[in-house]
Image (tube, grey):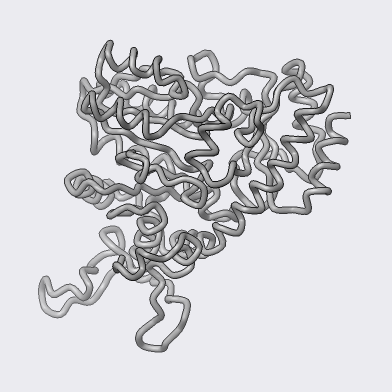
């Protein structure tokens, strides 16, 4: 990224970073490079460093430049899924005997990856409420973890963690501080600027933004760790294909305006739900009643499109989730369309019975960019 480009605002970077026009034709949209292999000018004479689709592809390079620019990092890496990105990061950073200190409110797949895939290879796992820095300090004093891993806002209870405070605790203990920024996106929050070492994304969600492509990303500054991640990206091979990379790039170009609308709609729905007699609790950092509201207002520019609500029972929560019409009952989040999810039996079923289990009365909403009056009417009829 050039110095001139780095001075641009996020909305401009989302449109232009890594997106230079095609020098041959002048096409404003760079072409999608589907070739799996690249002709060499003599043995080892690589054009632009490209030799084989797993080791590098110009469309993926463009996306990685875009990702790095958005998060303000030196290095961006694109993967076939968010979990593929997490797997590479953890294997690059950890050795058998090392430990991860994980938030107790996280995406179920992250917990499953560490607890069921990496643990048999000697990786330890402890969980703690990352929004409670005193609890984090106590856990770190007990035993310094190699990796401190947090989601903020968290999935699905929307807890807010002080990234700068967490980074200070982690760095004093020699830990790598990783922030999953999937819910907020760089349009609302930039963890590297607050002291985090690595940012993780499921680009399937808000970055892609249209529920039509699966992907993941890592963004960081550290040269040595970036070299290890780049090696594993190549050696293990869970790379994003050219069409997936292009779809993600196309989605990112409208990220800023989409996040504005997601946040506005979610805020209106959260306010409506908070005053409803059938709703026991609303989890949304934009509400003044949220325990992390003031912190979120400091480290985020808006409060995002994700919210959760608790009803009086698990049965009521299931009924609500199956009664919406415009909100579609589905896994995932972050697309332009509104989705409703029952975490206990859907996205977080794998953590039932663990410290990361989600209360059965909780429903998660991914609020889309539809007309807010239509969304409010749908929520209201589902509560009835």
Quadrant holding the C terminus: top right
Report the front residue among 214 and 378.
Answer: 378
Is 206 positioned to the left or the right of 65 in the image? right
Q: Position of residue 157 (x, y in %)?
A: 58, 27
Instruction: From this view, report whether residue 257 is shown above or below residue 162.
Output: below
Q: Position of residue 102 (x, y in %)?
A: 39, 24
Is 190 positioned to the left or the right of 213 in the image? left
Q: Residue at x 51, y 21 (%)?
A: 351
Is 145 positioned to the left or the right of 128 in the image? left
Instruction: From this view, report whether residue 132 is shown above or below residue 232.
Output: above
Among the 4 quarters of the image, the one containing residue 352 = top right
Instruction: From this view, report whether residue 166 is shown above or below residue 329.
Output: above
Among the 4 quarters of the image, the one containing residue 42 = bottom left
Q: Residue at x 24, y 35 (%)?
A: 93
Instruction: From this view, report whether residue 92 is shown above or below residue 175.
Output: below
Quadrant holding the N terminus: bottom left
Report the front residue among 65 and 153.
Answer: 153
Report the front residue among 124 and 39.
Answer: 124
Q: Residue at x 41, y 88 (%)?
A: 25
């Amino acid at each position: 990224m050039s110095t001139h480009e780095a001075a641009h605002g996020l909305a401009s970077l989302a449109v232009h970073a890594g997106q230079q026009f095609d020098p041959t034709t002048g096409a404003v949209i760079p072409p999608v490079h589907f070739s799996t292999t690249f002709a060499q000018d003599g043995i080892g004479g690589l054009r632009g460093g490209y030799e084989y689709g797993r080791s590098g592809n110009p469309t993926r390079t463009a996306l990685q430049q875009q990702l790095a620019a958005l998060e303000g990092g030196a290095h961006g890496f694109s993967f076939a899924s968010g979990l593929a990105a997490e797997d590479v990061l953890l294997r690059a950073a950890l050795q058998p005997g090392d430990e991860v200190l994980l938030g107790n409110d996280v995406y179920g797949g992250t917990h499953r990856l560490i607890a069921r895939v990496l643990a048999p290879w000697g990786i330890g796992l402890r969980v703690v409420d990352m929004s409670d820095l005193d609890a984090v300090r106590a856990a770190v004093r007990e035993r310094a973890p190699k990796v401190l891993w947090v989601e903020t806002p968290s999935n699905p209870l929307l807890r807010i963690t002080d990234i700068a405070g967490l980074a200070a605790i982690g760095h004093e203990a020699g830990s790598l501080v990783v922030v999953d920024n999937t819910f907020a996106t760089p349009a609302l929050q930039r963890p590297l600027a607050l002291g985090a070492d690595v940012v993780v994304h499921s680009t399937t969600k808000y970055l892609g933004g249209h529920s039509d492509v699966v992907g993941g990303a890592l963004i960081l500054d550290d040269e040595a760790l970036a070299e290890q991640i780049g090696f594993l990206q190549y050696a293990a091979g869970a790379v994003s294909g050219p069409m997936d990379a292009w779809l993600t790039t196309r989605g990112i170009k409208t990220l800023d305006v989409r996040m504005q609308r997601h946040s506005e709609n979610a805020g209106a729905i959260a306010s409506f739900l908070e005053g409803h007699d059938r709703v026991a609790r609303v989890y949304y950092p934009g509400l003044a009643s949220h325990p992390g509201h003031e912190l979120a207002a400091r480290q985020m520019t808006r409060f995002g499109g994700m919210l959760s609500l608790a009803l009086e029972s698990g049965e009521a929560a299931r009924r609500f989730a199956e009664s919406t019409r415009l909100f579609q009952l589905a896994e995932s989040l972050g697309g332009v369309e509104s989705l409703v999810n029952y975490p206990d039996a859907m996205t977080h079923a794998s953590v039932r019975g663990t410290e990361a289990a989600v209360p059965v009365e909780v429903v998660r909403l991914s609020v889309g960019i539809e007309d807010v009056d239509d969304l409010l009417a749908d929520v209201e009829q589902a509560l009835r």
